[in-house]
Structures are given as C-alpha cells and as structure tokens.
C-alpha cells in the first residue's frame, strides 16, 4: 500500500477561503487527481477516509467543504441531529455557488506540481452524489462517480430546472450507483437518469444494487453493505484508471 501524506489546505475562490482535506502519495511523482464531495454530514471521518483511500491507490485527492459559505468546519457523525443540521445547510446551497467552488478546487489541483495535467475525476456521496452530477458539467471533469444522489431528476440546489436537464453538458464519463431499496430515490428516477444519459449520448454506466439502501458505501452507516461497497469501489477505480 502506498504511503501517503495528508493535510488541511485552503482553496481560494475570490474572497472565500474553502477549507479542504488533501491526501496524496508520499514522495516525488506525477499523479492523476480526484475531487471527493461530501455527504450532508460534512468533511467528516468517512469522507477523509475515502480521500485517503484514493491517495493509497495512487491519486491526489481533495475533499473541499461545500458548506464553507454556511458552516465553516462543519463535520458530524451519523446521528439524527447531524442529519437534521446537514439537511438544513443543504437546503441553503445554490448550484451556481457549488459549481464555482468546485471550479476553484480544480484550479487549486492544477496549481500543484504533482498533479497530472488534463482531466480530473470527481466522486460524491448522498447530497454529494447530486453535486457530483452537477460537477460533471464542468469542462475539467473527465470522469464522475455519483453515489445515491437524491433529487437529480426532480430539483437542483437553490431552485430552478432539475439537474438532470444539464445532462447534455457532461463532457466526460459518468458512473452512477444506486441501491434498489433506497427510500430517497425511487427506481423510476434512476430510469429517468439512465434514459437521459442515453438520449444525450453521454458515456455512462448505471449500477443498481439489490438489497442496498441509501448510504450503502459508508461503513459508518447502518445501511452499509460490504459486498456492494467493495464492488462499487472496484468499478470506480476502473473508471478513473481508464480515463484519468
């Protein structure tokens, strides 16, 4: 396993300093880069762990705090209270600001001498899965893994046409992962997403996991499903290794 180094950094977006967690392989080298987008629970231990797993796999990975404008330093565990607070912040986000912050994160990555020139990968979970679908529309994002992003077919952060309507703007490859027992994402919405990706001729794959609910990738949540999580992780690594 690759030895890694981690640190907290700041990503500048105009006057806004976005806190971010950065993990990278130790030692000299040029590596592909990945942006990790948090759940509603903030850049917590699970998101840091995922970021570190990418570094161990040979990527430079960064997890920006997408609630920086609302709640600097927000990171909570998987409790009802944490969920309620995280959802409150989620309701105050705006697609334009999220995209702006992620564009600044792209600029930050490309300022690092260890980052391989070219496209960057993106992965997001829960609300971050929805935001990752948005991020896939940024020209610098070459591959996206969206995990159980609720509301893609029905809404967009801050209001307006559903994020699904932006599918034609996706320029790279998108993989989307859903649990068939997810109460937050009806299967008909998954079918809508798949149909739109096909219609717009976006390079994509949709993965559905039987017996899995919302949050099946997170080993700190009751919905964790080890077999599904391991299978999905391998598919993400295949996606990024073949495109970045």
Image (cartoon, grey):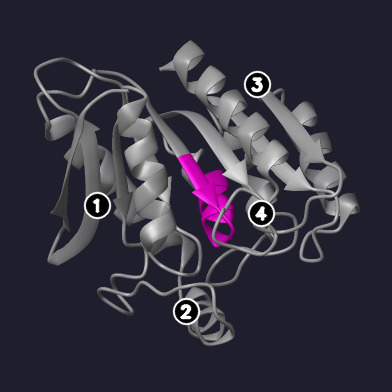
Nearest the viewer among 46 and 12 is 46
Report x, y in % for residue 38: 44, 57
Report x, y in % for residue 116: 23, 18
Q: Earlier in the sequence, mark 3 or mark 1?
A: 1
Q: Is residue 54 above or below residue 57?
A: below
Q: Nearer the viewer, mark 3 or mark 1?
A: 1
Report, in whole angstroms, how far the alpha carbon at label 4 lies from the one at label 3: 28 Å
Residue appearing at x 49%, y 77% in the figure: 86
Q: Which residue is mark 2?
A: 92
Report, in whole angstroms, how far the alpha carbon at label 3 lies from the one at label 1: 29 Å
Residue 126 within the magenta-colored segment of the rendering: yes
Label annotation for residue 21: 1
Q: Is residue 208 left or right of residue 167?
A: right
Q: Earlier in the sequence, mark 3 or mark 2?
A: 2
Q: Which residues are magenta?
A: 123-134
Nearest the viewer among 20 and 213 is 213
Residue 228 within the magenta-colored segment of the rendering: no
Q: Is residue 99 visible?
A: no
Report, in whole angstroms, how far the alpha carbon at label 4 lies from the one at label 2: 28 Å
Q: Which quadrant, please, contains the C terminus?
A: top left
Q: Which quadrant, please, contains the N terminus?
A: top left
Q: Which residue is mark 3?
A: 203
């Amino acid at each position: 396993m690759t030895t890694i180094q981690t640190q907290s950094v700041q990503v500048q977006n105009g006057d806004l300093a976005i806190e971010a967690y950065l993990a990278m392989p130790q030692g000299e080298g040029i590596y592909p880069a990945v942006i990790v987008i948090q759940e509603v629970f903030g850049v917590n231990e699970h998101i840091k762990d995922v970021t570190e797993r990418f570094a161990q796999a040979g990527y430079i990975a960064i997890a920006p705090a997408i609630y920086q404008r609302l709640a600097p330093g927000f990171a909570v565990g998987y409790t009802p209270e944490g969920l309620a607070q995280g959802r409150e912040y989620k309701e105050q986000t705006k697609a334009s600001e999220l995209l702006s912050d992620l564009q600044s994160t792209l600029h930050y990555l490309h300022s690092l001498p260890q980052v391989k020139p070219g496209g960057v990968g993106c992965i997001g979970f829960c609300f971050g899965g929805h935001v990752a679908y948005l991020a896939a529309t940024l020209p610098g994002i070459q591959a996206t893994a969206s995990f159980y992003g609720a509301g893609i077919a029905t809404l967009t952060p801050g209001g307006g046409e559903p994020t699904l309507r932006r599918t034609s703007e996706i320029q790279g490859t998108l993989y989307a992962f859903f649990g068939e027992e997810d109460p937050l994402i009806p299967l008909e919405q998954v079918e809508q997403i798949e149909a739109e990706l096909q219609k717009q001729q976006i390079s994509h794959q949709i993965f559905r996991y039987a017996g899995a609910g919302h949050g099946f990738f997170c080993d700190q949540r009751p919905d964790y499903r080890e077999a599904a999580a391991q299978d999905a992780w391998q598919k993400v690594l295949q996606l990024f290794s073949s495109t970045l």
